[in-house]
Amino acid sequence: MRITDTSDLWWKNAVIYSLDVETYQDGNGDGIGDFSGLARRIDYLAELGVTCLWLMPFYPSPDKDDGYDITDFYTVDPRLGTLGDFVEVTRTAHDRGMKVIVDLVLNHTSDEHPWFTESRTSTDNPYRDWYVWRDTEPPDTSDKVVFPDAEDSIWEKDEATGEWYLHHFYRFQPDLNIANPSVREEIGRIIGFWTQLGVDGFRVDAVPFILDTTGYTRAEKRDLGDPMDVLRETCALLRRRTGDGILLGEVNVPYKDQYGFFGGEHGDGLSLQFDFIGMQAVYLAMARHDSRPIVKALRQRAKYPLARETQWANFLRNHDELTLDKLTESERQEVFDAFGPEKEMQVFDRGLKRRLPPMLGGDPRRIRMAYSLLFALPGTPSLFYGEEIGMGEDLAEEGRMAVRTPMQWTSEESAGFSRRGPDALVAPLAGGGYGPDHVNVAHQRSDSGSLYSFIRSLIYLHRRHPELGWAPVEILDVGAGKNGVLALAARGEEAAVVTVHNLGAEGCTVTLSLDDVEPGSRLIDLWDQRALDDDPTTPIEVQLDGYGYRWLRVQSEADTRLY
């Protein structure tokens, strides 16, 4: 790779930061975050080092599912501002060097969307086929529901017409019918609209469900053909309109299936996909103090080599429940026992409603090791707002809402989020040891030893060393009896970045051997910013504290970059 390639395919070494506008910053004092408030925080994000801002849904909505039940794809919820406010945010973010992607929810609408309101007026309404209907009573589909605490079927009877409509998620979120050409045309218009307002791409919600043909008639399936073609056409449209726009997919399926969503060897599908399997392996590894689950996941995904234009996105936390659905039942229980033993900490019997610091008992060594590991894994790191300061959750909130508390800017009564009192805020603040009295930006921003300063340094290191996002990654042998240590080498043409992480509580020393190191190369400690005496052409000893980590650069004589 050349350093100039990193601008052509910017997403391969980006740092993504996800936030919900309504819980980030209140600009007008009504207790609800908005775009005018977010605009005032763009410089904060630039200072942190964020290169890609991902905005959760901000469209008009009854808000039964925190904005994922949409009634209009073409404007901003009035509570959050106007289209003009949105454009000011994208323009300011671009000026500060940040790309902006927004949530694209194509699987379903709200049942209050005008399209669905029309569709249920009669069986021959023009909008009827924009959704998926059946006229016979459906079989038992309780094993297919996404939210088993709230639904027992993926079909709901509509009393107005006596037929059933499909909803993979909540019953108030009817599924759109992508077999209908009019629906596909409308998706193109939505993409075109937002790209004209400065959007650089989209995070696509629930991708496998969009392409699922459950409930389609035989004729619809025949006319639709390969559902993956719809994805390819959508990606091609975005690239034509923007040149370098991306689709970041939420695709929680086995690696072999994810490969198809990337477009296989052609890379003409999604630009990025979240690595849910790798994320779950990290938590199992931390629970066991054993790196082997991560090694297994990395080797599994390496069986499906990606095209140059595509990339994995790594994360430790997102806006949903921390799903553990790809672990076995016994493995899931191990993670529950370690990080969420109480029922109130769990959700849907498959995940956790907690943020990372409380799960790790507030241990600063372990928290920093976990984030260092996130940024060292091959791919693009993604952060959820508040992770940079170690925010906690509010377990009193239902399900996924536990981690969607207001951003904690100061130790003031309403955390600097709003001028309104705590009782008037859009969501309750986290309390206890993770409340704004103890965890906030103002305290950490000026403290060189804070988690904020650590995350900022991590972002800097990741951006300075694009091998982490681009280069082939080798899992290094650390020797017998050292299963708690994970050592990775990302090898570029002129340098390699070696990262070593100790998932165990006890310190240790490992010996690493690097193949094909050019004579005259030197070893750089990236955290200390100094050259070491070790000769990387011979085995090197690496000392690690309990929950310790090291970042090293093997720099050839041809590499003139400063470290």
Image (cartoon, rainbow, N blue to C red):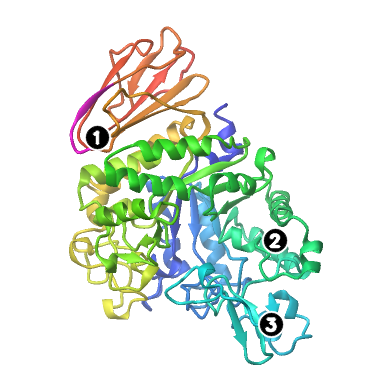
- In this view, the residue in front, 297 or 205, is 297
Rendered image: mark on residue 2: none
State which mark lies toward you, 3 or 2. 3
Residue lying at the far top in this picture: please name it: 519
The residue shown at (67%, 90%) is 162
Q: Which residue is mark 3?
A: 136
Identify residue type, mark 3: Thr
Q: Residues within 10 Å of mark 1 (few under 14, many from 20)?
A: many
State which mark lies toward you, 1 or 2. 1
**In the rendered structure, which disc, 3 or 2, sits on the residue that comes first in sequence?**
3
Q: Which residue is mark 2?
A: 192
The percent position of residue 343, horizontal first and vertical second, equals: 28, 67
Left or right of 246? Residue 522 is left
Q: Quadrant of the N terminus?
A: top right
Question: In the image, which residues are magenta?
Answer: 504-510
Q: Which residue is mark 1?
A: 548
Q: Quadrant of the C terminus?
A: top left
Q: Is residue 109 above or below residue 488?
A: below
Identify residue type, mark 2: Gly
In the structure shown, which secondary structural element does the residue marked by tag 2 occupy? helix
